[in-house]
Amino acid sequence: MTEIVRIQHVSKTFQDKKAVNNVSFSIKKGEVIAILGPNGAGKTTTISMLLGLLHPTSGSIQLFGLNPSEKKVREKIGTMLQEVSVMNGLKSKELLELIRNYYPNPLSLKELIQLTGLTDTDLRTRAEKLSGGQKRRLSFALALSGNPDLIMFDEPTVGMDITSRNRFWKTIKQLAAQGKTIIFTTHYLQEADDVAERILLFHNGSIIADGTPAEIKARIAKQAVSFTTNDPFQAFEKLNQHSVVTNIYQKNERIIVQTGDTDAVLALLFEEKVGAQQIQIENGKLEEAFEQLTNNHQEAM
Amino acid sequence: MKILRLQCKAEILRVLRNPYFVFWSLLMPIVFYFIFTKVVNTGAPDKAEWQAHYLMSMTAFSVMGSSIMTLGIRIVQERQHGWATFMRLTPLSDTVYFTAQMMGQTVIHLFSIIVIFTAGALINGVSLTALEWISSGAWILIASTPFLALGTLIGLMRRVETAAGISNVIYMAMAVAGGMWMPLEIMPKIMQTIGKWLPSYNFGNGAWAIVQGNAPEWRNILILIAYLVLFMLLSKYIRRKQEAM
């Protein structure tokens, strides 16, 4: 399999804020990748560098073995940006016809309509009069118009209703089946889990996990034991000494102890006499765990 | 080449569908022309001369307006709304994009000139020799370059509202102070002195000279070139500063 994207030791600093910190990864042809992370994790900065819109402060980025801003690369990529915009004064159809001409082997208008669900009304409407949803469909069609090998989306489903969202992901899976390489950013774990074959989990500008959704889930959806106590400080102290405890934190009065072995932690609670009350065993919801992992990353490592 | 042609076509279509353009660059100059040659008695000694003179004023006014406003505001809009970013990600080269915009703008100017000249001929039966029609039209077309450069300069502003406000003020001030609405000769001395250094006056004066059977003065040409260079250097400087951020 050929390597489509190669990022090596890339960092990006804005003024004195480090947005992306020494990130390296490579992506092979046909992979569907989710760049997952909370807001401010460096997702958009990373994708902007992949697109050649921002230059890394240090490190190197290659797409198809070339610099991202080369014309040869531009001919092979399609993109939908976070801020959806279209050129005023042209009808959707005119705009699509125009953009298609920029590429050596564009998709036909018919194929684009079939993939994106653009309607006749959409096509006849002038860009500035399109509704939010119509604009999304048009910019999706614009992204695909050059029949790209590599497709990049920055937060593609923000502002989409459920129907359009489902349709969008259905199309993405269809494109993936054709062997296209797809990279998208999202802050919804569920979305990454449903669509991506591989997740790059970003936090504070670094990749903290890189693997299949199943691997990531196993890592982050930890089981936990929670309880209340009159002396949380002592409980923290005592429990932290045991290696079976992977993470310990407090949330709404309750102390939450993350672990791979809840039975062992239960035993510990009584051995260490931490005064645990209202004990619960929690199987850890995925979203919550993701939130925890990204929030408490420094403590957890 | 095919791409450039299609791109130009798209640009022209966009301008023609822009209500701002139709209002400010076609309707307004023709209405003004009608008012100041038909309705208001300006007391000009030579009526035919005044009608030809004012037709040039209004045509120059129109072309100056679409250079500064239509072009400038559109550039800001495209950048602010992220369209410019999207275009950067397509294989279309910046040069083709820019050239097409300029060529499209020129075709639009030619169109405005023809429309307003025709209106002048119909409203007042302005009659010039074929050579005068062609050379005054050509002057307005070519000498508008400094205003296109000014439009691109305005295009560097960050917000559409600012760009629209500022370009409107510049446009109106230059039109009035440059003698496009009323001849500079009837204005106070100080205004005349300032006016003669404005690009708008020098732009208009070339066309006024042509319809009187003279050639544009060298002074007009040189001043316009100086403004062109100034605006281009300024854009270059500002763009570099913006990129450095």
Image (spheres, helix red, strand yellow):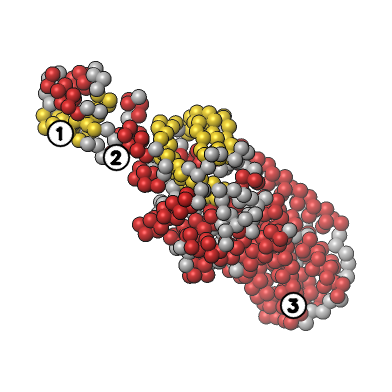
Instruction: State the residue position of label 3.
Output: B118
Q: Secondary structure at mark 2?
A: helix
The answer to whether A45 appears left or right of B63 in the picture is left
The answer to whether B34 appears left or right of B50 in the picture is left
Q: Secondary structure at mark 3?
A: helix
Instruction: State the residue position of label 2.
Output: A286
Given the image, on which type of amino acid does mark 3 rest?
Thr
Instruction: State the residue position of label 1.
Output: A280
Kindly indicate whether the residue at mark 3 contacts the one at mark 1 (C-beta within 8 angstroms).
no
Q: CA distance from mark 1 to mark 2?
A: 17 Å
Name above or below for residue A208 compared with residue B206: above
* Image location of residue B186, percent across then percent down: 75, 66
Q: Residue at the location (74% across, 73% down)?
A: B114
Nearer the observer, B110 or A263:
A263
Name above or below for residue B65 compared with residue A35: below
Kindly indicate whether the residue at mark 2 contacts the one at mark 3 (C-beta within 8 angstroms).
no
Q: CA distance from mark 1 to mark 3?
A: 87 Å
Residue A104 circle label: none
Nearer the observer, B16 or A171:
A171
Given the image, on which type of amino acid does mark 2 rest?
Leu
User: Marks 3 and 2: which is nearer the front?
Assistant: 2
Q: Tag 3, which chain?
A: B
Quarter of the rendering occupied by the C terminus of chain B: top right
Residue B157 visible to the viewer: no
The answer to whether A191 appears left or right of A61 in the picture is left
Q: CA distance from mark 3 to mark 2?
A: 72 Å
Q: Secondary structure at mark 1?
A: strand
Nearer the observer, A178 or A143:
A178
Given the image, on which type of amino acid does mark 1 rest?
Gln
